[in-house]
Amino acid sequence: MTAIKFGTDGWRGIIAQDFTFDNLRLVSQAFVSWLKSQQLADKGLFIGYDNRFDSENFAQAAAEVCSGAGIKTFLSPRAVPTPVVSFAVNKLKLGAGIMITASHNPPQWNGFKIKENFGGSAFPETTQAVEKALTEKLLITPTRKNIELLDPIEPYLKFIGSKVDLQLIKSPNIKIVVDAMYGSGAGLFARLGLPVMECRGFRDTQFGGINPEPIPVNLDESISFTKEVALKYRNELTGCIILDGDADRLAAIDGTGQFINTHNVFCLLLKHLFVHRKMKGEVVKTFNLTNLIDTLCRQYGLKLTVTPIGFKHIAKIMLERDVLLGGEESGGMGIKGNIPERDGILAGLHLLELMAYEKKTFKQILDALMDENGYFFYSRIDKHTEKAQALVKNLSQQPPQDFAGQAVSKVETLDGLKFNFADGSWILFRASGTEPLLRIYCEGTSQDRLEQLLAAGDKLAS
């Protein structure tokens, strides 16, 4: 049996190499063992899957193992977003859920996410228990007798549609573009009755040769499409919502073609929820998100908590406290009034509602925020290397006092290694929890400063 480890959010592997039907059945068996140990098996479970290669067959195989263990297993009849699985688990009061997805990973990958009974990402102690329950032999005889098909899309859409003013969003002055990146979020904005023009809204198991992650390198097609829509309708109030492969994360594009990164999406959502929707509560961000959030929280009088990277840390706080907005650099946002889970579709609806409230573009609203609170520029480098863990460890043991021509004012090790500078800039080195990658996150107070820091970071990592 190939070594199976759960990373930041689930177990992921290369299809036919690590992520095989045999390994999937063993992980499903270990999941069943954990479910029974928590006295949750009698509550049943829900299994969903995304648009990746063979996801429906992997989901069927997992369902047959759970069914073979005597557990009532609800299986989606179609590809669904990850937040739909979490919604089904929460609203049907099930014991847990399984989502077959590798999220933003390359097309040759697939994965296994566990959703706990509250409807959110599995906690580390849960995935550790599942790992410990792994055996090299399948002891359960798979069967289909306890499997029932269940499509929770319509109840989910009714629920999230009630959280925004759909009629306001339907304003004829707004042109809505959605880039589903060939993922399982395709078609859902339209099913909410919104006049949507969709880009890459069909299944392609190779994702058009890109990774289904909403970052600029993967968005040439949607940037061009959004600019064409704005030009065709001579309407500057054009906005594009970009979903990742399983639609639990998002970014955006302005009608001018400007990319609105995940940091800026968080800030726009925070402004909208506090200023327009008059909502309050604690704000939670991961270690690698912009300092503009800190500034806005001080301005709005909201408590801010910083967590390690991974939405499971945010979900835990959302379960325990009154959280207005929680989010991570990868674009996962959890909003008060929803389940404690990332939801790219609901977050996208709130972004569109913000544009309808202000009758301004994403860029105009963001520029006004930064004119008032300072400009922040962000970028990231992903370096493929098997030595990522060792690089971060070695750098942590002897961090430099000066970096890229400036003194390091503060070193933080909450998750990875972060150098902070007096001007508000920072750079973070972190090994990925799901891939052989070194991620270098960076924020500068000017574009030149950002590029200077990133170049020094890239050189150091090499």
Image (cartoon, rainbow, N blue to C red):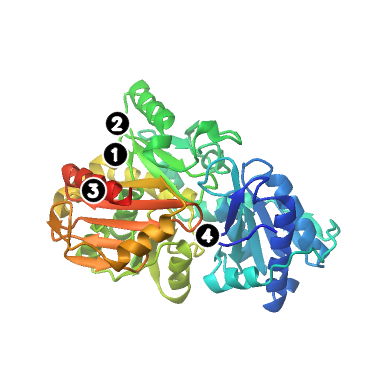
Q: Are marks 1 and 3 in contact (CB under 8 Å)?
A: no
Distance CA(mark 1)–CA(mark 3): 34 Å
Which is more foreground, mark 1 or mark 3? Answer: 3
The reply to whether dot 2 and dot 4 touch (C-beta < 8 Å) is no
For marks 1 and 3, the one nearer the N-term is 1
Where in the figure is residue 460, as x and y percent of width and height?
28, 51
Mark closest to the chain's N terminus, 2 or 1: 2
Numbered disc 2: secondary structure:
loop
Amino acid type of disc 4?
Answer: Asp
The mark closer to the camera, 2 or 3, is: 3
- Element at badge 3? helix
277 lies left or right of 209: left
Closer to us: mark 3 or mark 4? 3
Q: Nearer the viewer, mark 2 or mark 4?
A: 4
Q: Which mark is first along the chain, 4 or 1?
A: 4
**Label 3 is placed on what type of residue?**
Ala
Closer to viewer: mark 2 or mark 1 = 2
Under circle 1, the secondary element is: loop
Q: Which residue does the image show at 34% across and 45% down from the upper left? A: 261
| Residue 200 in sight from this viewpoint | no
- Residue 109's place in the image compared with 43, above or below, is above
Per the image, the residue denoted by label 3 is 456
Residue topped by disc 2:
256
Estimate the spatial distance between the alpha carbons at disc 3 and disc 4, rounded to whole Å: 30 Å
Residue 361: assigned label: 1
Amino acid type indicated by mark 2? Thr
Q: Position of residue 371 (x, y in %)?
A: 15, 48
Q: Earlier in the sequence, mark 3 or mark 4?
A: 4
| Front one among 447 and 455 | 455
Q: Quadrant of residue 303?
A: bottom left
Task: Please give the residue where the numbered disc 4 appears in the rendered image.
Answer: 9
